[in-house]
Image: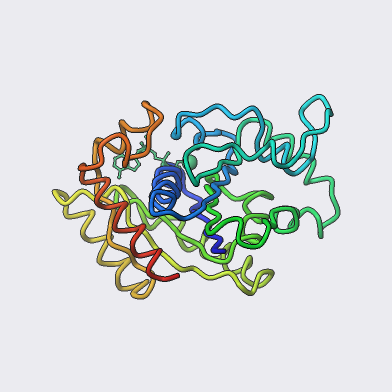
Amino acid sequence: MRKIAVAMAKGGVGKTTTAVNLAHGLSLAGHRVLIVDCDTQGQTAKFLGVAPPFGLYEFITGTDARGNPVAKKETLFPARENLWLLAGGINLVELKNWLGEQPREIRQAVLAKTLVPRDGALDYLIFDCAPGWDVLSVNILMAATEVLCPVALQGPALEGLKTFFGYLMSAQRMNQELQLKYVLPTLFDRRTRHSSEIYDVLRRLFSKQICEPIHYNVRLTEAPSSGQSIFEYSRHAAGAMDYHQLVRRIRNDA
Ligand SMILES: Nc1ncnc2c1ncn2[C@@H]1O[C@H](COP(=O)(O)OP(=O)(O)OP(=O)(O)O)[C@@H](O)[C@H]1O
Ligand SMILES: [Mg+2]
């Protein structure tokens, strides 16, 4: 099973868009995929047009907000064929408070310890990380083995990148299996020189990890409002082609 964290401290760079479309693309190709939303915004469920009653909070604590027991399998929401969701949401604030009170061993590694699917039950675990850096981000990087970093080719794109890669390196000291595997340029606008310049810098810095860019595509902006992945909303759109290419690259590395 491959465990891929879609992570970048900067907000609005296309983490959720990438996690959802990658996960759905892999499931359409016949792989069994679990997407884990680690964000208090709980966007992953909205992007998929579902409203699971339980999620990551209940999965880890084993209870609902009132303290009633919840079985692990009830927390895994079947979002599509071959695609399950462990939803995020506002109750992850509680989870972070709870984690903050735990001894270091549990605080940093609870996800790695609890998220152990039966052999062969899943082919891919995709983590949709929150912006910023907190106790849950650390947990994800303890549970994942590959990191995919979306970098928006807009505005001050390279700002904060060094700090974020510093975080990644400190996580790698705790989880030796963790690799920065993919750098994914997003929101690529070929009409602006700025986009191409940042893309060139990324290609130079990450010659092995760099992926074909995801172009700015209005269909990708619209799809979440209808609760559909790009493959459902507009499968011939440029955004669908771009994400299809990413799915292919990741499958080819298996
Ligand atoms: N390639 C793209 N073309 C057009 N719009 C896009 C593209 N990628 C993402 N978007 C839009 O940009 C916004 C931010 O994307 P998204 O929510 O995926 O970013 P994020 O990194 O998950 O944000 P956050 O850090 O808040 O979790 C969304 O409205 C999304 O629909
Ligand atoms: Mg997001």
Number of residue marks: 0
Q: Is residue 75 visible?
A: yes
The residue that appears at 16% across and 50% down in the rendered structure is 192
The residue that appears at 62% across and 52% down in the rendered structure is 137
Q: Quadrant of the N terminus?
A: bottom right
Q: Give the x, y percent position of residue 188.
A: 25, 51
Left or right: where 74 falls relative to 168: right
The residue that appears at 37% across and 75% down in the rendered structure is 208
Q: Tell me where residue 232 sits by quadrant.
A: top left
Q: Nearer the viewer, residue 185 or 219?
A: 219
Q: Tell me where residue 161 sits by quadrant.
A: bottom left
Q: Quadrant of the C terminus?
A: bottom left
Q: Nearer the viewer, residue 216 or 132?
A: 216
Q: Nearer the viewer, residue 124 or 190?
A: 124
Does residue 75 sit above or below 67 in this rendering? below
Q: Residue at the far left: name it.
A: 191
Does residue 251 sit above or below 81 in this rendering? below
Q: Is residue 13 visible?
A: no
Q: Give the x, y percent position of residue 78.
A: 55, 38
